[in-house]
Image (cartoon, rainbow, N blue to C red):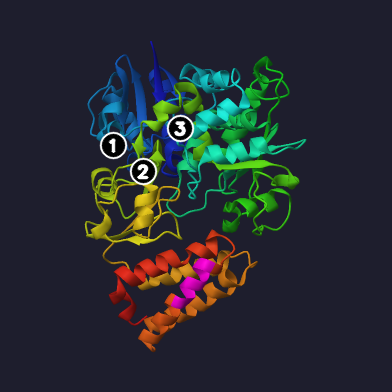
Amino acid sequence: MSFTVYVPRDASALSLGAEATASAIAAEAARRGIDVALVRNGSRGLYWLEPMVEVAAPEGRVAYGPVQADDVAALFDADFLHGGRHALALGPTEQIPYLAKQERLTFARVGIVDPRSLDDYRAHGGYRGLENALKMAPADIVAAVTDSGLRGRGGAAFPTGIKWKTCLDASADKKYIVCNADEGDSGTFADRMVMEGDPFVLIEGMTIAGLAVGATQGYIYLRCEYPHARDALNAAIAATTAAGYLGNDVLGSDKAFHLEVRMAAGAYICGEETSLLESLEGKRGQVRFKPPLPAIEGLFGKPTVINNVVTLCSVPGILDKGAAHYRDFGMGRSRGTLPFQLAGNLKRPGLVEKAFGVTLKELIEDFGGGSATGRPIKTVQLGGPLGAYIPPSRYDTPMDYEAFAAIGGMIGHGGLVAFDDSVDMAAQARYAMEFCAIESCGKCTPCRIGSTRGVEVIDRMRANVERDRNEALLRDLCQTMLHGSLCALGGMAPFPVLSALDHYPEDFARSA
């Protein structure tokens, strides 16, 4: 009898010992003469339980975790291949509350399929969206994405359908699809997770985007610190090209789409779409003036759709199940789901895909389990290193783009970093300004100079030097950066600074 055992090859799981665990399972099975098929899947996103091992059973998978190499012999002794009882037993995987309470649309296959198997991807509904798109006119594909309410998941939340229509309507002899996979915000890992755990869905989404706007070439601009994602994507591109899903004649449609992975330059500013284009063209990553918009004049001066990973990975499901199915999730103008990434001082860090409308309190307490230290959570930063700090009094705010904008916050890429009451918010505000100074491309004065002056002013405040005068100066400087910066780096650096000043003024009264 053969048994199928799943051990993640996700980068976070590997960092926690998954490779040694997989090797130990293979060796122990061989020693005992048991036929075990080892599948290296993606992570389910329950990172406090990694490496999480799953065993295929007739009624579904059964999970154990966190499993280290030293635990493997005892698992075999407990007959874990038949769901045996053990201290690391977690029960049926799908019934683990952290997973059972989620609404996984974009991440529906992550942790389930073998990310290197095209057959497995297809067996779990893959490429149905592309097959439907091939039967539609480009304008109808764009209309479906528009009707779904999908907005950019990279942070700006711009309506995806409007961007695609602009590119579709632009006349040119060449068009491009560019995926922004330069995931650099603190506390974010959704892009990496889906690229490592379900790379075919990104390829399918980009191919559909190409059909929608008439683009024949795509590029994935991938964060240089993601070698595992690079390997997964390149393997998937090779498999889909060999099977006819990419190339000069996609599935016999006489329509072409080619795809390449390009490694990023390692600069945070290249997460901004025009800096990304500069880098992709082999230039220094600096922000371009807009207009023209990239959808009209983008890569190499040609019309270009730039979307982030999760945005493009959401498209196949929309084309498969219809715009209304996706639109039925969410609230207000925030439709569908978002993969929230829980990080920082939490007992249960991981990925939670939920429909818009879930509250910060639910994410922090119900999923995150409160602080890992047991101390009260003082603040949460949402939206990366330039996101505002949200105080506990705002934790009941629903996750909705407009609702968060109304309280001076932003959802961004869905990264959430929690801090307990030992954090110094003045130090955090200083870090935001210093980060901006280090990562600025240098093209505009408010960002380049303003962030440097901001660090100096905060240092004076922390030293109790003319505190009131320097606070007024800092607030004035923040307004200049907000309204005068060329891109969101300088324009958002004031968010964490002002939120720290407004909600935690006492921290600025301490001496450094």
Q: How far apart in space, not on screen, are marks 2 and 3 (Cα)?
A: 27 Å
Q: Is residue 189 magenta?
A: no
Up/down of 256 relative to 294, above or below: above
**Mark 1 or mark 3: whose residue is earlier in sequence:** 1
Work out which residue is located at the far top of the displayed protein and give it: 1
Quick check: marks 1 and 2 in contact, CB under 8 Å? yes
Q: Which dot marks residue 203?
A: none
Q: Which residue position is annotated with label 3?
A: 148
**Quadrant (top left, top right, bottom left, bottom right) of the N terminus:** top left
Q: Gap in Å between the C-alphas at discs 1 and 3?
A: 27 Å
In this view, the mark in front (2 or 3): 3
Of the two numbered discs 1 and 2 on the same chain, state the one appearing first in sequence: 1
Name the secondary structure under disc 2: strand
Query: Looking at the picture, does residue 256 appear above or below residue 98?
Result: above
Between residues 477 and 113, which one lies in front from this camera angle?
Answer: 477
Q: Residues within 10 Å of mark 2 (few under 14, many from 20)?
A: many
Q: What type is the residue that disc 2 sits on? A: Gly
Asked which quadrant contains residue 216, the reply is top right
Marking on residue 98: 1
Indicate the position of residue 28 as horizontal and vertical percent values: 40, 26
